[in-house]
Amino acid sequence: MKTLKLNFRLGIVLLILTCNTHSLFSQNDATLRILKSFVDDYSKDVALTKDAVFGIQVDSTFWHVKAIARTESNAASVVLFEGKPKTPTYYFKTDPETLVKIDKGELNALTASAKAFSTDITPFDVETMPGFQPDENFVDDMFSVFFHFWTKGLPERIPYGLEYTRFTHGAQASIFYYQKGFRSGYFAIKKGQHANEDERSKTNPFPSLFIAIKGKGTIIINGMTSKLAAGEAILIPAGISHEFLNANDEPLEGFIFMFGEGA
């Protein structure tokens, strides 16, 4: 009887281990298929004009990509490898659920990485390997890969609207495009939200242009309160405090463009 019970328990343990292993393999297979689809798309990208090597970590599994830009005589080559890059570089870090959303166009990678402060934890991020020594072009090169590798198609389409946002800086936002000296995105301030309420968010060292396209709300500029409504745009100079509030049922929606040195 004891032997029967032991064999039964052992069978249950083996069944659980088998199911978990199968689930892990299935998840890795799905992740690999998604990553290969991004690699294939990037090889056709007109913006691939500079060689790049970067890593991708999905949960605890590492891959790396080697992208060779096209020349007059050769087509572009983008190859996915298992494991970490041999030479220290930067890498994108995410989880399978977020990767699926990005693949389906339900969330773009830049929005998934949006954070108000460096200590914020996001479902998608960029980190660097120990020993990596970025050069002066790192920011431009990284943002180019960030957008063009993780955004498929030609033209590369970025859906926007409340359903594509994440909560950051006290409101909803999604990012369109970043490069050194330029940031662009969509914002929505829902009823009861207070954007830039935190003192650390109130000012930027660069100008910001807000364009309201729907709804209305309250703005506080350098301590002065006024209104912002659809059909209006406001420019916030560098170093000027700005907050947005909404007490209305309808969200205040619009576009934001930040530009200049430091953006």
Image (cartoon, rainbow, N blue to C red):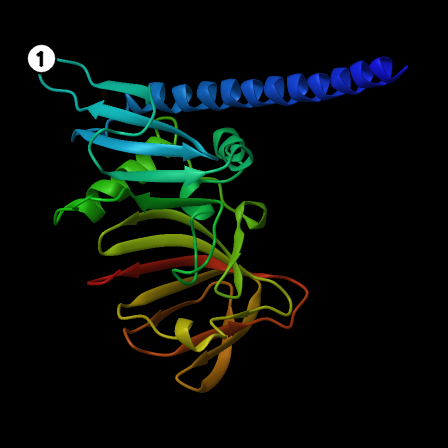
**Most extreme residue toward the left, as rendered?**
72
**Nearer-the-camera pick, 62 or 263:** 62
Horizontal side of residue 204 vs 23, given as left or right: left
**Most extreme residue toward the front, as rendered?**
2
Horizontal side of residue 6 vs 118, given as left or right: right
Q: Residues within 10 Å of mark 1 (few under 14, many from 20)?
A: few
Horizontal side of residue 89 vs 173, given as left or right: left
Q: Give the residue number, with chain letter if any, for mark 1.
A: 73
**Nearer-the-camera pick, 47 or 21:** 21
Q: Position of residue 244 (x, y in %)?
A: 50, 72
Q: Measuring 33% from the left and 31% from the top, which residue is drawn there?
A: 149
Q: Could you say whether the residue bearing mark 1 is in a helix, strand or loop?
A: loop
Residue 123 higher or lower than 169, as above or below: above
**Nearer-the-camera pick, 263 or 78:** 78
Residue 214 higher or lower than 113, as above or below: below
Q: Position of residue 17 (x, y in %)?
A: 65, 21
Q: Position of residue 41 (x, y in %)?
A: 35, 22
Q: In terms of image quadrants, where is residue 63?
A: top left
Give the number of marks: 1
Q: Position of residue 9 (x, y in %)?
A: 79, 20
* Residue 234 in view of the camera: yes
Question: Dividing the image into 4 quarters, which one contains the N terminus?
Answer: top right
Residue 66 higher or lower than 74, as above or below: below
Question: Dividing the image into 4 quarters, which one contains the C terminus?
Answer: bottom left
Name the amino acid type tagged 1.
Ser
Residue 20 higher or lower than 109, as above or below: above
* Residue 156 in view of the camera: no
Horizontal side of residue 148 vs 117, given as left or right: left
Q: Measuring 32% from the left and 70% from the top, which residue is drawn there?
A: 204
